[in-house]
Amino acid sequence: MKNFKLLTLVAVAGLAVISCGKKTVIEGTLEGCGNSEVIVKLLDVNRFQVLDTVKTNASGQFSYKPEIAAGQPEFIYIFRGNKQLASLLLENGDKVKVQMDSLGNYSVEGSEESLKLQQVEKDYNSFLKDIRDIAYSEDSGPAVSRRYISYYRDRLTYVMKNSHSLTVVPVLFQQVNPNMMVFDQPTDGILMQNVCDSLKTVYPESRYVRVLEKEAIRRLALMNADSKLKNAREVGYIDITLPGLDGRPITLSENLDKVTMLYFWSSTAAQKMYNIDAISPLYEEFHHKGLEIYSVALDSDKAAWAAAVRNQNLPWINVCDIRGELSPLIASYGIRSLPMVWFIVDGTIDVNANVSNEADIRKYLRKKL
């Protein structure tokens, strides 16, 4: 399923060109790898950008001068082939010495932030190893929870004590697994926003602070959406008006039935199969009993969506929000992944509907209809 975590990081503009300022210098030694090569990479927020390939001399020594703007520290990584050897967080004018071996063990001199980053990565790798080891034990469920809670509290303490250090940014984006971040709750957006406020006093132009702020805003929007939906019996639901296949607007509130299934999806291959395998049989079974489906595709490619609807001959109400992942409906309806379903019964969102698959939906509809 397509994940809107988004949000784990977002790509931004490349490294700024520097016309003046102090030089940053990396003096490195790769033990036992004379006349070899290392690759210097920049973390361009959510991906590595190769800066250069540097040759070592017969003693494994090399030197590199990354361009780093004043007030905009950068995460710099040294690789040999696909193996990451060292992680650095460098400011303009830093002069660091890095001693490495081919296994990824290294020491740093001349950069306090790099030392912090090294410890952050050691703690994170230790946590992930513990989680993997626990997964094979008989007490895996409770033990995993205990280890996670312990690590979360430890990282929370680290973030609060180091709120002016950019090393907190990767901490706040760490993952337990591909489907769960360490700081996974919408309420963590409050912490992220507070950290952003602190970091902006030191690094107001940093790309990493801007990305963290975007994630904080997203989390706070989800928190507000959760609050709205929990009070749905009082506030009803958030109405939607979007264009259908012919371009004419179709409004949710004007197309309600006894039970209205608000169905969010996108025209990926897997979700198109879900239409055929799950949604179509449900519609055929329950439509005549009072079920209506208001289907919202979060697709920036309107043509792909229209082709999917026509090719599958989907008989329910189909609209498209071409804003895709930027749609405000994501926050309004607390959408974390697609497909996602809400039910409107008697003019209000049924916040107690607990459905996660076709069987759950069928059971729910049989009870309501």
Image (cartoon, rainbow, N blue to C red):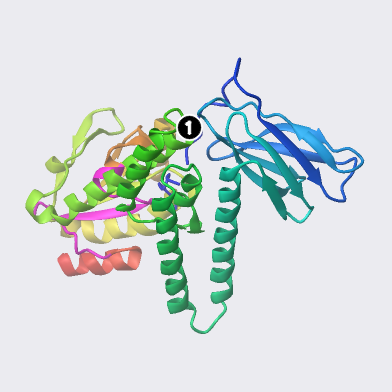
30 part of magenta stretch: no
Seen from this angle, which residue lies furthest right? 58
According to the picture, the residue beneath numbered tag 1 turns out to be 207
Q: Quadrant of residue 325?
A: top left
The magenta stretch spans which residues?
330-354
Answer above or below: position of 306 versus 313.
above
Q: Position of residue 251 (x, y in %)?
A: 17, 37
Q: State the residue in front, 253 or 366.
A: 253
Residue positioned 58% across, 65% down in the render: 126
Q: Quadrant of residue 29?
A: top right
Q: State the residue in front, 203 or 278.
A: 203
Q: Position of residue 95 (x, y in %)?
A: 67, 34
335 part of magenta stretch: yes
Q: State the residue in front, 148 or 110.
A: 110
Q: Quadrant of residue 359?
A: bottom left
> In the rendered image, is residue 295 in sight?
no
> In the rendered image, is residue 37 in sight?
yes
Q: Position of residue 250 (x, y in %)?
A: 20, 35
